[in-house]
Image (spheres, rainbow, N blue to C red):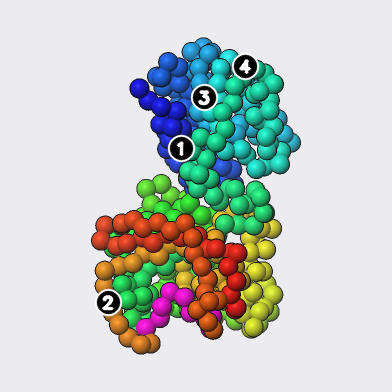
Amino acid sequence: MLCPEEFMRRALELAERGAGWTSPNPMVGAVIVKRNIILSEGWHEKFGSPHAEFVALQRAEALARGADLYLNLEPCVAAPGKRNPPCADEIIRAGIRRVFVALRDPDPRINGKGIEALRRAGIEVIEGLLEREARKLNEIYLKFKTTGKPFVTLKMAMTADGKIATHTRDSQWISSQRSLEFAHELRHRHRAILVGIETVLADNPQLTARLAKKTRNPIRIVLDSHGRIPLDAEVVRSAHQVRTILATTDAIPAEKEHALQQAHVEIWKLPARDGRVDPCAVIEKLAQEQLDSMLIEGGSEIAWSFLSQRLIDKILFVIAPKIVGGRTAPSPVGGIGVERVRDAIHLKEITISRLDGDILYEAYVNKESTFSS
């Protein structure tokens, strides 16, 4: 006999199918169960499509009466701007007996109101089942809804001796094919991807999600304070196909700005900090654009500029079983660094997994730790 945790885990698995497609809405899965048998399932497939609860209830039809419903996120209620019918009303109308909810929706239009509506209708609601897993699944949505700021992930590939390139700046490819595919899956899941001009000059990347199974390319952002990006760079040549942004300052030459705009590159002129684009200004601009997430892929100076301002939420280090050596070979995080070990940036909630022969080190930045920039 299956237990409630297993049904909720199935709801989480279904919700995961919407990864990268539902933004800026959450990923939601729904499972309808009666007498320990799954009657129907549903998930939110993409932004604007029917909600998970609605899909599952339609599939169950009259059999839903008296059944249990498992949701990884609180059902919505009627609210201004909502495209879909309120799910709480649909649940009540279907005659669901009991609802298991992993997590309340922090959207102020919903927060607690969906659960309250169900309870007023006499439906038993059990909260908190697999809440930690539900929070991790929708970590991007939760941060954006509670702070208005994007969730920022720093992903870097390095050798076992902590190098992201050789002393000649050769870096292709440090990690395995599976790790490259994983990187493209991450690009698909984030609304934007950011690199510095040095990465563009060294690697000439495409910054697309072409290796992901299902692709939604992220918006490409290049930090280039002085407009050094070549007009024949891959990201410039394909800017008519994928939204591409150059985050720069007033130092960009007017003729270069015009040429880039002619090539369909969008220009963000942002405030400078120490002669470079202020990373805080990038985050503010992303928030204004309603972009809920950003993946940073390099380079080391960019990594430090965002870390030192406490702008990184999550770190993903892919460690390849290789050693390249070299005292001048770059490491994942550059910049000036901290002066004392006690000022180090602390990480928490660390997990280790494998990507074929590579090791994936996943952690979150402890923003309560103090350090000097």
Element under label 4? helix
Gap between marks 2 and 4 measured at Cα: 62 Å
Q: Earlier in the sequence, mark 2 or mark 3?
A: 3
Task: Tell me the residue that label 3 is attached to.
Answer: 69
The three-letter amino acid code for the residue at tag 4 is: Arg
Contact (CB < 8 A) between labels 1 and 4? no
Element under label 3? strand
Task: Tell me the residue that label 2 is attached to.
Answer: 323
99 relative to 166, above or below: above
Task: Tell me the residue that label 1 is attached to.
Answer: 12
What are the residue bounds of the magenta stretch?
329-338
Q: Count numbered badges in the picture.
A: 4
**Residue placed most toward the observer, 205 or 173:** 173
Gap between marks 3 and 1 measured at Cα: 13 Å
The three-letter amino acid code for the residue at tag 1 is: Leu
Q: Earlier in the sequence, mark 2 or mark 4?
A: 4
The three-letter amino acid code for the residue at tag 3 is: Leu
Residue 17, by quadrant, is top left
- Dot 4, how many residues are within 10 Å of its Cα: few (below 14), some (14-19), or many (20+)? few
Is residue 192 in sight in this rendering?
A: yes
Q: Quadrant of the N terminus?
A: top left
Gap between marks 4 and 3 measured at Cα: 13 Å
Is residue 230 in sight in this rendering?
A: no
Gap between marks 1 and 2 measured at Cα: 39 Å
